[in-house]
Image (spheres, helix red, strand yellow):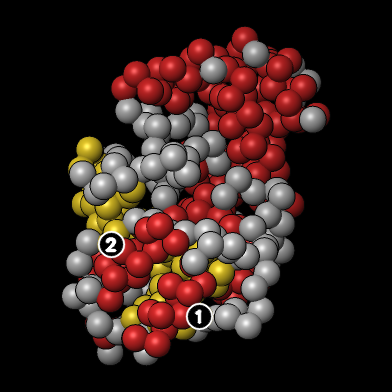
Amino acid sequence: MVENAKIAILLSTYNGAEYLAEQISSIIQQTYANWQLFIRDDGSTDQTTQIIQKYQKMNQHIIFLNESHIENLGVKRSFMELLAVTQADYYMFCDQDDVWLPEKIQLTLNEMLKNRDKEVPRLVHTDLMVVDQDLQPQRPMFGRDFQDNFRDVLYSNSVTGCTVMINETLRQLLLKQPFDPKQIVMHDWWFALVAAAFGEIAYLAEPTILYRQHGNNTFGADVKGFQRLRRFFKMEQEIKRFTDALQQDDYFAAVFGKADNLSAENKRYLQAAVTIRHSKNNFMAIKALFNSKAKKSTLKGTLLMWYVLGFRHNALKQSIKN
């Protein structure tokens, strides 16, 4: 029965000994029982592999995939390798330094099963509770509901990999096409693009994970108030973000742009992003963005995007060339 679906949890580790045991323990304590944890180490030099071996001996649901062949692939390729060598009904992705709340699997699966059409590539993601290194709660990362449509996912990503569940149809679509980690920003954004283009993304506005912030993983957490406003004064970083997104869009167009099942509307949105990347002047870029009506997940982010195109287009072009 699909209510007892097999869940593959995919964990890529790298020098994560400090918090890894806490993360694995939180998976073992899930209320949903039909899961397997597949771990691939990406070349750790600390005690990470010993911790994995310990838990593998303790629990038959835990599988150390490359115990005899440790190789550094980088995080993007490592997760794609995990996705390629596992088989289940649904797939979840796991960081090495967070804590899963006890009902994370069950709540995410419930959201996934709201659409039981197995032909539809589907991705579910949830809110996160941002905590400090001692797990003291600070705030939900998003704290609201929003729509993840292809038009907007081309320019910004609100899908956090460690909250994601995908179905088998999306997995097959991801593995069938080329994957160049140099051309994409992050694997979770790539998953979101493919799901939004050919299927659907669902969001559960409930934290299912304690998302630990510490010195080694501040990526993705700078989302509130003055922290976002500071981006106005770090324009080179904003230009780099925009450049990376447009490069990823260009690669998506090369891989999927001619797909028969990509709707005419999504093809127009994709072409607008490609036009912006290759525009010779800011007028062409602004016109393409205006016609697409694209926006980021926040007003500040959208204003920054317009500012870059309107007033820093030459710097954007130079960043693209580099």
Badge 2 crowding class, 10 Å Cα cut-off, few under 14, some 14 to 19, many 20 or more, is: many
Kindly identify which numbered label has been placed on residue 64. Answer: 1
**If the image is split into quadrants, where does the C terminus sit?**
top right
Callout 2, which amino acid? Trp
| Residue 40 relative to residue 4: left or right | right
Question: Can see residue 253?
Answer: no
Q: What element carries label 2?
A: strand
In percent of the image, x 49 and y 67: which residue is there? 48
Residue drawn where x is 77% and y is 22% of the image: 318
Image position of 1 with respect to 273: above or below: below
> Which quadrant holds the N terminus?
bottom left
Residue 38, position as x, y percentages in the image: 47, 77
In front: label 2 or label 1: 1
Image quadrant where residue 146 sits: top left
Q: Is residue 16 left or right of residue 184?
A: left
Crowding around mark 1 (Cα neighbors within 10 Å: few <14, some 14 to 19, many 20+) is: some
* Amino acid type shown at disc 1: Phe
Which residue occupies 64% across, 73% down?
A: 70
Task: Return the x and y of residue 232 as percentages of the image width and height.
Answer: 49, 15
Please name the residue that numbered disc 2 is placed on.
100
Q: Are marks 2 and 1 in contact (CB under 8 Å)?
A: no
Inter-mark Cα distance, 2 to 1: 20 Å
Going from N to C along the chain, the mark reached first, 2 or 1, is: 1
Q: Is residue 213 left or right of residue 52?
A: left
Closer to us: 97 or 9 = 97
Residue 264: x and y in percent read: 59, 49
Residue nearest the viewer, comparing 293 with 105 = 105
Which residue sits at x=68%, y=69%? 71
